Amino acid sequence: MKSIIMNKILAVCMLALFTSVSVFAQETDGNVKNGEKLFKDNCTACHALDRKLTGPALKGIVTSLAAEGIDKEWLHKWITNNEALRKSGDKRANQIFEEYNQTAMDIFEGRLSDQDIDDILAYVENPPVPEEAAPVAVQKDDSGNLSYILLSFISIGIVLIIILVNINRLVKLKTTGADLTELQATRIKTLSQFYERNRKLSYFIISIILALSLYGFWGWLMGIGVDKGYAPDQPIYFSHKIHAGENNIDCQLCHSGAKYGKVSEIPSLSVCMNCHRNISEYTGKYVEPGKSKEFYTQEIKKIYDYIGWDEEKQAYTGIQKPIKWERIHNMPDFVYFNHSQHVVAGERAIMADYNKKNPNNQIDVVCKACHGPIDTKDVAKMANDFTMGWCVECHRTTEIDLDNGYNAAYFNQLHEKLKKEYGEDKSKITVDAIGGLECGKCHY
Ligand code: HEC
Ligand code: HEC
Ligand code: HEC
Ligand code: HEC
Ligand code: HEC
Ligand code: HEC
């Protein structure tokens, strides 16, 4: 009897839960896909779904605020202009502002419409489960080349040892004045006899050895100035996998120079502090084999040490230590490389070309075409050769973006001329056509 009543109660509860969920689902009528994009573009610099960054975690924010009696309208006001809401004396707005050390959130008035905000809220309320990540293609490396070099060095070594041993024997014989024993006599005789009788074969063997060692030496020479894979120790163990990968932080939030000029720049520690004022411990799921959460937490504390931040008092001490990041990429002074030319003007062309050539390894930001999948690497490495041949190869094969908004006017003029020069049938116009192989474009 008792159990029947329990079952009924349970059934009623389930029904209630179910209807409230479906009523709620009807309420969040935003476009989740658009919301996801807007969230990534505007909010991930400070917010994550399920953990605290500069601002609070936002997953399920509509329901959790509803539980406190705060409606969606409040959220609209807050996201549109949090400052105005605070100034209006709104209690919750001021309370959360204090809770986050008075860190001001961006104002989105005029940047996001009401529908946009609904879309974002729909996304953070029910973020779709991410699909299984596509397997990352194994990166090609130079170890093949290295083994050739090793092989040729070993063969040279063996030949040298044989020669030395024989010379040593002869010298010994001479100094001791002893007669050649029968055995030694036959041996030396057979070696020279071998040479006498099989001249052609001997020449052949010698030339193979010579060719191998030359090839090795050439390979070694070509390797000079190619630092692919270079990954120096850094003053703080900074993981791109954790920042750009696990936490989806946009490259340009930190490397903000890439859009505007020649260099991308390593971010200053005050950029780090935008987030690390509040993130003082590592609580993420991802831990690199051989490392621990405590290790990561200690590395975060190093930021405080360098910049002079007293965690207890939550204030700067004014005592700073300069931090020196080891540069990984460093072109010689006579080379002119401009990021904005590639990141802004060339973005579409480079991405389209890369994704066409690598159908199984698509990139979502242009940077990865040159810097590789750095968001999957614990330690930043040089992902390509960064030699002249590498620049030129891409300029030869990448079709430029002829209606590139950045310099459309220029190209429109050029278009007809190029078509005449390259012929109508050659519809492919690559970077070399606009001067991408002229020495003066890349050299001072
Ligand atoms: C520059 C950093 C920054 C950006 C960008 C940012 N926020 Fe915030 N957000 C904060 C901070 C910090 C807080 C905590 C309150 C405070 O200090 O103002 C906050 C609070 C919030 C809250 C209130 C949560 C609560 O519990 O009351 C919501 C909702 C919110 N942000 C949504 C968004 C959305 C949506 C976007 C993107 C359109 C966004 N934020 C972009 C920093 C940011
Ligand atoms: C949270 C800040 C942050 C984000 C986000 C970030 N980086 Fe970095 N990046 C750094 C720091 C700090 C260094 C210097 C330490 C190192 O080399 O690991 C660096 C180094 C680099 C270097 C090597 C620079 C050199 O010394 O030559 C490259 C290339 C790079 N980042 C590319 C990227 C790309 C591409 C992305 C996006 C997928 C990205 N970064 C996202 C902070 C960031
Ligand atoms: C066309 C290839 C290419 C693309 C695309 C590219 N980079 Fe670079 N990057 C380079 C080269 C080449 C250097 C070395 C420049 C030098 O030493 O003068 C470099 C250097 C860097 C450095 C070291 C500091 C500096 O500026 O010299 C950082 C950081 C960096 N890139 C980040 C980025 C980010 C972030 C993006 C995407 C927004 C990006 N790069 C896109 C080729 C590229
Ligand atoms: C946009 C926010 C943001 C910025 C900017 C940022 N970080 Fe982080 N950082 C994070 C997050 C999120 C984590 C992971 C925290 C967690 O999962 O508990 C993290 C973790 C770390 C860790 C521990 C894991 C690791 O990478 O070794 C270190 C160290 C660190 N950050 C250093 C830096 C440095 C140095 C800078 C400035 C160059 C910086 N961070 C800038 C958000 C940021
Ligand atoms: C991944 C392909 C790629 C690589 C690698 C690359 N570039 Fe480019 N580069 C481009 C594209 C695409 C453009 C054309 C951009 C545009 O539409 O204006 C360009 C344009 C240029 C221009 C301007 C050419 C002109 O006539 O206006 C210069 C200079 C240049 N790159 C230098 C370099 C140097 C130096 C390197 C090597 C360190 C390099 N690039 C590596 C794709 C690449
Ligand atoms: C697309 C860009 C680009 C163009 C065009 C270009 N170079 Fe270079 N060149 C480079 C880069 C990058 C390096 C540095 C390579 C390194 O450090 O490994 C370089 C290096 C050199 C060097 C030094 C030797 C070496 O290989 O390191 C010489 C000499 C040189 N270039 C001559 C020329 C001449 C001559 C032309 C015109 C026919 C030319 N370059 C056109 C990008 C370019």
Image (cartoon, rainbow, N blue to C red):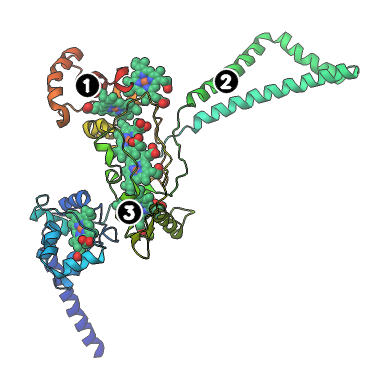
Give the residue at x 53% y 30%: 146
Q: Quadrant of ligand 6?
A: top left
Q: Position of residue 270 (x, y in %)?
A: 32, 50
Outermost residue, front side: 318
Mark 2 to mark 3: distance in Å? 55 Å
**Residue 205 position (above or below residue 90):** above
Residue picked out by circle 3: 273
Mark 2 to mark 1: distance in Å? 41 Å
**Residue 211 position (above or below residue 75):** above
Viewer can see residue 374: no
Mark 1 to mark 3: distance in Å? 45 Å
**Residue 92 position (above or below residue 184):** below
- As helix, strand or loop, the secondary structure at mark 2 comes to helix
Residue picked out by circle 2: 212
Q: Earlier in the sequence, mark 2 or mark 1?
A: 2
Q: Position of residue 6 (x, y in %)?
A: 23, 85
Query: Which of these two is toward me, 295 or 378?
Result: 295
Q: Decide: few, some or many residues near mark 3? Use Cα within 10 Å; few <14, some 14-19, many ≥20.
A: some
**Nearer the camera: disc 2 or disc 1:** 1
Query: Which of these two is toward me, 117 or 270?
Result: 270
Residue picked out by circle 1: 429
The residue under label 1 is which amino acid type? Ile
Give the residue at x 37% y 60%: 280
- As helix, strand or loop, the secondary structure at mark 3 comes to helix
Q: Is mark 2 within 8 Å of ligand 6?
A: no
Q: Decide: few, some or many residues near mark 2? Use Cα within 10 Å; few <14, some 14-19, many ≥20.
A: some
**Nearer the camera: disc 1 or disc 3:** 3
